[in-house]
Amino acid sequence: MDTASQRIVVTGANGRLGTATCELFASLGLDFVGTDISVQSTTTFEVVTADLRDYDEVRTVLDGAHAVVHLGNHPGLGNTPPHLIFNENVAINENVFQCASELGLTHIVFASTIQLFGSKPDLRTVSHPPTRPPFPITSDTVLAPSNLYSLSKQVSEVMLKFYAERCGLTTTALRLPLLHHNERHFTVSTGNETEHDVFEGFTSLTYTDAAELILAVLRSDLDGFNAFSAGVADRHLDLELSELASTFFPELPPHTKHLIDSTPIYSTTGWWPTPSAWK
């Protein structure tokens, strides 16, 4: 899309990724509207209130837009009942996707999750957690959600494929890892690695990188349904990639440079993650 002249709606604008995305768009002078369920006084851009669970409110906020960056979901399990997270995420996403189709938007960019590959099983629900996926993560890696939050993302990716194939929209799911502002408590040292760290390949992205990825997707010449995984194996302070491979990921082919293959993103958008500030 022509981001210089076409309006973009950013849902979940009060969240950390929503804020980073809106601030990036504002710094570039793009025509965008941020929306969230409430207004926060700390934002430097205007936020229109909308409850995405209400179809009519979604339709109002999307009217006149060309694209929607849809970040307005429950961000994880937390203390919310898992069935409520699943039900509300899926209902919200259907409202956004269907309104986008009816109103003639051209592109949906959707925040999905690396948890699709099996990390963070919710033992309140799951009695048979999946095994760790083989690395590197690629577009062919089998999805195996192990909680209702990640299941809501998988179901929503199926919905995105429907709206691309049957309704003509360009839709992109970004399977994002842990996002951060270089907070030190997200790093890992030898001896305190968790199963979740290993399942996700010690990967992360800064909020700035994730926002720039969203913009790169909007500006690219994509078509149909796309699902991209992005992340850098940078959270382990003591081990470089070759040492991580020998310790945790013996299946990695020799000379592998990444635990998540971002080559498809680079080849279509020119985006590549920046080096970590932790080391």
Image (spheres, helix red, strand yellow):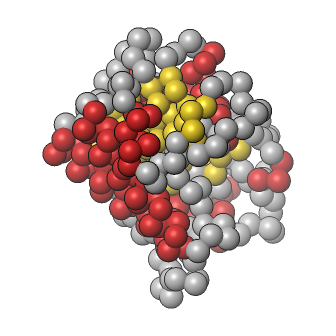
Give the image quarter of residue 61.
top left
Q: Nearer the viewer, residue 1 or 250?
A: 1
Q: Quadrant of the C terminus?
A: top right
Q: Eyeballing the image, is 44 above or below 135?
A: above
Q: Nearer the viewer, residue 254 or 261?
A: 261
Q: How many marks?
A: 0
- 240 or 115, which lies in front? 115
Q: Is any atom of residue 5 visible in this view?
A: yes
Q: Is residue 271 above or below residue 146?
A: above
Q: Residue at x 51, y 34 (%)?
A: 10
Q: Residue furthest left?
A: 166
| Position of residue 15 measured from the top left corner of the image (x, y, whole percent) | 65, 43
Asked if residue 272 is positioned above or below residue 180 in the image, the reply reads: above
Quarter placement of the N terminus: top left
Q: Is residue 51 left or right of residue 222?
A: right
Q: Position of residue 49 (x, y in %)?
A: 57, 38
Q: Residue at x 30, y 56 (%)?
A: 158
User: Quadrant of residue 194 in the image?
Assistant: bottom right
Q: Residue at x 71, y 44 (%)?
A: 180
